[in-house]
Amino acid sequence: MSNSIAVVYHSGYGHTQVLAEAVIEGIKEGGANALLVPVDKVDEHWDDLADAKGIIFGSPTYMGSVSADFKGFMDKSSKVWAEQGWKDKLAAGFTNSGSQSGDKLNTLMQMSVFAAQQGMLWVSLGLMPGNNSSTASVNDLNRIGSYLGAMAQSNTDQGADVAPPTSDRETAKMLGKRVAETASRYKL
């Protein structure tokens, strides 16, 4: 199996792609090779996903769940599921929405259940919550306070050049690094 971690994502307006790119930075910083796979190109990468040590899932949260495009990728993976082709690979997830909550936890739960169905091993964010005291700041890592995966918030009137903010991008980067470092600890 290769030393790569794949990031499979959908981005409707560019904000989730910014996070996917940050996750890729973290994977590289964690010592692994990284592969960025937009869901509309997944048919070109099934073999790469089979060879990867882990797959990190990324989707915006639309109407309280993953986007339709990301759900399409999930559904396309049914052959992999039937063969348990991703069994014992690492998995993790990240999401983004326009509001602070936006029901992002449901999206991460949907991804983690999908990973469990695939027989994968879920890697949590591993960061304590930030921005939760009078001395804290919106610039803290994990400012939204997620444990299951990385959550980000992008103001709906700002483009991907400025949203999500740096703290959310850095949180996504830490997720990628954590998955890469976890992969290096195990013979997968």
Image (spheres, rainbow, N blue to C red):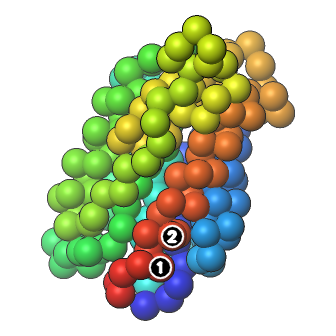
Q: Position of residue 69 (x, y in %)?
A: 46, 44
- At a point 68% along the width and 40% down the height, the residue shown is 169
Disc 2 and disc 1: Cα gap in Å?
A: 5 Å
User: Residue tagged by mark 2?
Assistant: 181
User: Residue tagged by mark 1?
Assistant: 184
Mark 2 vs 1: CB contact within 8 A? yes
- At a point 35% along the width and 29% down the height, the residue shown is 105
Amino acid type, residue under disc 2 in the picture: Glu
1 left or right of 111?
A: right
Residue 146 vertical placement versus 187 (above, below): above
Front one among 154 and 43: 154
Q: Position of residue 40 (x, y in %)?
A: 55, 56
Image quadrant where one finds the N terminus? bottom left
Q: Position of residue 29 (x, y in %)?
A: 68, 67
32 left or right of 165?
A: left
- Name the secondary structure under disc 1: helix
Q: Is residue 96 visible?
A: no
Amino acid type, residue under disc 1 in the picture: Ser
Residue 16 vertical placement versus 126 (above, below): above
> Callout 2: few (<14), some (14-19), or many (20+) C-alpha neighbours within 10 Å?
some
- Name the secondary structure under disc 2: helix
Q: Is residue 93 visible?
A: yes
- At a point 51% along the width and 70% down the height, the residue shown is 181
Image quadrant where one finds the C terminus? bottom left
Residue 151 vertical placement versus 7 (above, below): above
